[in-house]
Image (cartoon, rainbow, N blue to C red):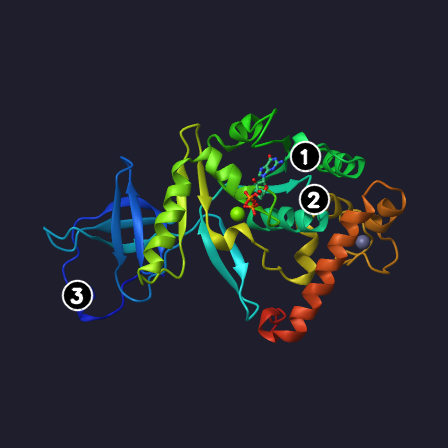
Amino acid sequence: MGRPRETRESREAIPPLTAGRVVANHGREVKVAGADGVRLACRLHGRKLEAVCGDEVRYGHASSGDVTGTVYEILPRRRSLSRLTGLGRSEAIVANLTQLVAVAATVPSPDWNVIDRYLAGAEWAGIKAVVIFNKCELGISDTAAAELASYAALGYPVVHCSTRAAPGIEGLVRHLAGEVSVLVGQSGTGKSSLLNALAPEAHAITQEISAATEEGRHTTTHAALHVLSSGGDLIDSPGVRDYAPPLPQVRDISSGFIEIAAAALGCKFQDCMHDTEPGCQVRREVEAGVIRRRRFDSYRHLVTMGREFDARFPERRRPPARVR
Ligand SMILES: Nc1nc2c(ncn2[C@@H]2O[C@H](COP(=O)(O)OP(=O)(O)O)[C@@H](O)[C@H]2O)c(=O)[nH]1
Ligand SMILES: [Mg+2]
Ligand SMILES: [Zn+2]
């Protein structure tokens, strides 16, 4: 990645390059912001280069007088959020983010297993996670309150919000400062409303894109990074909003559930799947009510899914380490 192909193009003299970040992605066209924040429309040099929002790049002007810039190199991604493709592979959708913001709400009725999956995705991606409970001016059921308390007990910040009434979105604003975040969650929980409240120009940008598409311009993907005036960056991408994380290898799924991973250290067998093995500390803690059974069920559900994937996509399974 990042090295231009051996074409006539790539043998052209490469102009002086500067460092920037991809802040909008329209397929082969991207917008890159320099250190000064100035945004420049750029094309990608060579067909092999693939950029996603948040990518750090090196870019320049292919020739003086060229109004469009050219991205020549994509720097290695520190942390990226990937999605599962139809072939069971993982594909980066945003790069270099630091935080996932999982949004649940009073309505639609929360699916906590979905929240577990997002939180697991954050753990696997090595990024922080926050749980937002939106529309809280409509009230919070006892079940929701108990689930939210259990996330807080695990160490995930839980923030109550409303885009319509008190307590507003102040709590969310505080958590976004200094981070590069994405909003994920079930449809209808208020992600677009939150984004519009945080980045008022976001709405205009969305409108602009759909208008351009109607005129026949080809925009298959679009993602944008909003620099919030309240601090922090928020990446919005259609692929991210309905995000489901790609599953790691089945034996690594427990690392997405911090309390299960912690208890697993006490299992008799190091490769315990917390199924029927003797001496399983995880199952002991589930029985004792230390680990929430619903979380354990979420974990087990993902293990079942992982096994199904392994059967459907054999290339997903890492070849066993061979001793020769
Ligand atoms: N009562 C209430 N409704 C909200 C709130 N935030 C958003 N909504 C409404 O919830 C619906 C779905 O919001 P939207 O932002 O499109 O959700 P998204 O699918 O997650 O992007 C819309 O009708 C919003 O007006 C809130 O804080 N309280
Ligand atoms: Mg929306
Ligand atoms: Zn176990």
Question: Disc 2 marks which amino acid?
Answer: Ile
Mark 1 and mark 2 residues within 8 Å of each other at the beta carbon: yes
**Residue 11, numbered circle:** 3
Q: Is mark 1 within 8 Å of ligand 3?
A: no
Q: Position of residue 168 (x, y in %)?
A: 57, 27
> What percent of the width, then of the height, locates residue 71?
26, 54
**Relative horizontal placement of residue 170, taking residue 320 as reference (left or right):** left
Instruction: Give the answer, above or below, for where 231 lies relative to 23.
Output: above
Considering only order in the chain, which callout, 3 or 1, is on the residue closer to the N terminus?
Answer: 3
The answer for how far apart the CA atoms under marks 1 and 3 are is 52 Å
Mark 2 highlights which residue? 258
Which structural element holds mark 3? Answer: helix
Q: Type of residue at label 1?
A: Gly
The reply to whether the residue tagged 2 has its Cβ within 8 angstroms of ligand 3 is no
Dot 2, crowdedness within 10 Å: few (<14), some or many (≥20)? Answer: some
Specify which label sits upstream in the sequence, 3 or 2.
Answer: 3
Residue 88, image x, y percentages: 57, 68
Q: Residue at x 81, y 43 (%)?
A: 291
